[in-house]
Image (spheres, grey):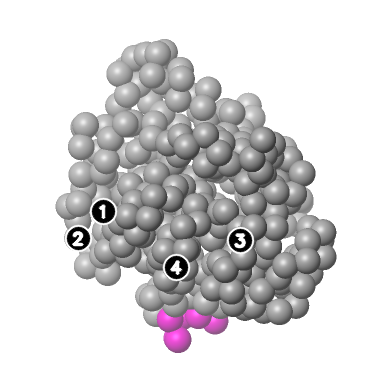
Amino acid sequence: MRTLGLCLIGCGRAGMIHARNYKNKVPGAKMVAVADVVEEAAVAAAAELGIDAWYTDYREALKNPAVDAVIVVSPTDLHRGIVLDCARAKKHVFCEKPMAMNVGECEDMIAACGQNGVKLQIGFMRRHDQSFRRAKKLLDEGTIGELVFIHSHTRGPSKPRPWMYDLKKSNGILAEVNSHDIDAIRWFAGSDMEHLYAVAGNYRNPEAREAYPDYYDSVSVNGKLKNGVGFSIDGAAFVQYGYDAHVEMVGTRGVIHVGRSDGDFVKVTTPENGTAGSFVSSWTALFEDAYLREDISFAEAVLNDAEVLVTGRDGLEAVKVVEAGNRSILSREIVKL
């Protein structure tokens, strides 16, 4: 049986989640190389994974005949260039979210992969999460009647890395944190966004206000999907109380909640009193199984020449919403998509 050889491009925390999965948990796949511009990171990753091939220039890794596919987990503004190079080298591509900085870059990536006959999967792992998939099934079966409204929020405890303050490199919290919410709403509702209105502010990172006045660590978005369903998204970074991801879907005959929650209607959780029962410390813990299922799905799509579950088109639509949200924040106006 053929074994899929993978190369990780970007050996940070998120990248190593995928690499550890492919090391010994994904049937028919194995890690064969890693690449990172920081030599120490590449060397450490290769040592942990038990492989010899490490590179500081990913282009050299693409020359390795053992590499069949790549996992791209670099800063967002580098995704387009890396993916185009990988496609031209005939390597299948798994690209973490956000897919790219703008719709034009997404279109370039989709076209390059299509022209070179390679798979392109985007890293929206919540579609692979068992609870999210169960909720999707219940929704599609009409358990709560006709869908009326969806609210989704993601709030993370981590301090933003310095490069994230620059919206020209990160596209802000809407991209880095809430891309998952955008994709989940589209997936659950089966529709793209029609229009939205967003507000945002920087409340927890005062040191960035002078150099990056447009940076925001909290955002709220309201709008309507093309099928008439209403939606809202809120996101935040550096909340400190824990990782918090939740979706609520309201129908004509009921409601579906997805995510970590319990029976308390009022809960106060602070760094001083610890993490309460409904919150976990990190997204790596909350979605550990979803990441594994996502990686298995990508390997199976390549090995069996099947369609990927999350396409470049899905990544593009999320980026389109991020761009619209950022325009709405700056203009203080409703933006049509």
| Circle on res. 335 | none
Badge 3 local density, few (<14 within 10 Å), some, or many (20+)? few
Q: Percent from the top left, x then y, of residue 248? A: 45, 32
Residue 94 seen in this snapshot: yes
The numbered mark, 2 or 4, whose residue comes first in the sequence reads 4
Q: Examine the rendering and report whether any part of residue 71 can be seen.
A: no
Question: Whole-Å distance between the Cαs marked 1 and 2?
Answer: 6 Å
Amino acid bearing label 1: Tyr
Amino acid type, label 4: Asp
Q: Nearer the viewer, mark 3 or mark 4?
A: 3
Residue 85 disc label: 4
- Outermost bottom residue: 211
Work out whether residue 138 or residue 112 is closer to the camera in this orientation and state it: 112
Q: Nearer the viewer, residue 153 or 21?
A: 21
**Residue beneath disc 3:** 65
**Residue 111 place in picture, x, y as percent:** 30, 56
Write the residue at 34% across / 51% down: 114
> What residue appears at the point 52 percent right and 30 percent down from the top-left corner?
132
Which one is nearer the viewer's eye here, 336 or 88? 88
Q: Residues within 10 Å of mark 1 (few under 14, many from 20)?
A: many
Residues drawn in magenta? 206-212
Q: Earlier in the sequence, mark 3 or mark 1?
A: 3
Does label 3 or label 4 sit earlier along the sequence?
A: 3
* SS label for mark 4: helix
Q: Residues within 10 Å of mark 2 (few under 14, many from 20)?
A: some
Provide the secondary structure element on which disc 1 rests: strand
Residue 278: quarter of image = top right
| Local secondary structure at mark 2 | loop
Q: Which label sits in the foreground, 1 or 4?
A: 4
The residue carrying mark 1 is 197
**Residues under labels 1 and 4: Cα distance?**
36 Å
The residue located at (38%, 76%) in the rendering is 168
